[in-house]
């Protein structure tokens, strides 16, 4: 009888530990979202810039993204939001900072991105990828994607899907760097639009590919200031 009671108590103890762990995760997730929302509400006009963490400072792509961010801030005064890490994120942060603008970094604790780049002027740290991803996609006036890997593609397809399914209003999606993005579009046309017809032809209009900083600025200026966050579905 005592053994059964002991096993029952042990089972309840394990259950309580699991429940406490779940509550701790929920509380931490809630705190991350709160910090992220409070930060971004300070910057009502912004563009979010995505790109590889592996681009070397001083390289051609690094310099192009740096100049683009610098040009955007000088022409619009908008805040630049990035993942706050190295590579092209650093290039965008540096461009915004050197133009006298605000550079917000939404950082994640990774070996490759353990420290914020030194050019962010404000930011917040995240433990969970998904909460950081929501904040990166939250209420920008435009989203700019440069050369990148799995993370950049993940963030791109998330926004494309939200717009395609009418979960958020239409927001400019700019793919910067035709050498990288034209083959991407060719893949979509051939394998998603063609063949089994997995998307509709108007879906190709959800993004624009360009190499022209002036064109990027024109798109941003034409975009309305986003307030879709007031009615998140």
Image (cartoon, grey):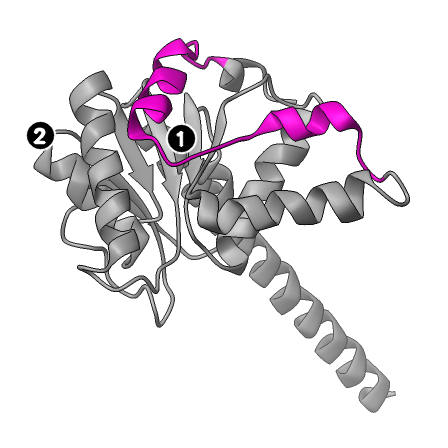
Magenta-colored stretch includes residue 25: no
Nearest the eye: 188 or 43: 188
Residue at (80%, 29%) from the top-left corner? 200
Residue at (73%, 41%) from the top-left corner? 189
Residue at the extreme right of the image, as rendered:
196
Q: What stretch is highlighted in magenta?
A: 198-227
Residue hosting label 2: 100
Instruction: State the image coordinates of residue 145 (x, y, percent, origin top left).
Output: 44, 41
Instruction: State the image coordinates of residue 113 (x, y, percent, origin top left).
Output: 32, 63
User: What crowding class fits label 1: few (fewer than 14 Cα within 10 Å), some (14-19), or many (20 or more)?
Assistant: some
Instruction: State the image coordinates of residue 194 (x, y, percent, origin top left).
Output: 83, 41
**Element on which disc 2 rests:** loop
Q: How many marks?
A: 2
Residue 41 seen in this snapshot: no
Instruction: State the image coordinates of residue 119 (x, y, percent, origin top left).
Output: 15, 47
Q: Is 87 left, or right, of 167 in this rendering?
A: left
Residue 219 seen in this snapshot: yes
Magenta-colored stretch includes residue 222: yes
Residue at (34%, 31%) from the top-left corner? 212
Identify the image quadrant of the C terminus.
Answer: top right
């Amino acid at each position: 009888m005592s053994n059964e009671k002991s096993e029952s108590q042990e089972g309840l103890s394990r259950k309580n530990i699991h429940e406490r762990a779940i509550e701790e995760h929920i509380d931490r997730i809630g705190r991350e979202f709160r910090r992220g929302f409070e930060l971004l509400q300070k910057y009502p006009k912004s563009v979010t810039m995505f790109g590889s963490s592996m681009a070397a400072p001083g390289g051609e792509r690094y310099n192009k993204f740096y100049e683009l961010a610098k040009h955007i801030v000088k022409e619009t005064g908008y805040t630049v939001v990035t993942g706050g890490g190295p590579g092209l994120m650093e290039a965008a942060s540096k461009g915004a900072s050197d133009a006298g603008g605000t550079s917000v970094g939404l950082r994640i604790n990774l070996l490759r991105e353990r420290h914020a780049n030194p050019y962010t002027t404000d930011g917040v740290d995240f433990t969970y990828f998904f909460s950081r991803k929501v904040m990166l996609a939250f209420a920008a006036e435009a989203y700019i994607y440069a050369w990148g890997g799995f993370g950049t593609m993940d963030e791109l397809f998330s926004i494309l899907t939200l717009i395609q399914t009418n979960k958020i209003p239409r927001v400019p999606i700019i793919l910067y760097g035709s050498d990288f993005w034209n083959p991407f579009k060719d893949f979509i046309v051939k394998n998603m639009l063609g063949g089994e017809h997995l998307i509709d032809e108007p879906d190709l209009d959800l993004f624009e590919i360009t190499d022209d900083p002036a064109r990027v600025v024109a798109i941003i200026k034409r975009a309305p200031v986003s307030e879709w966050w007031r009615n998140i579905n």
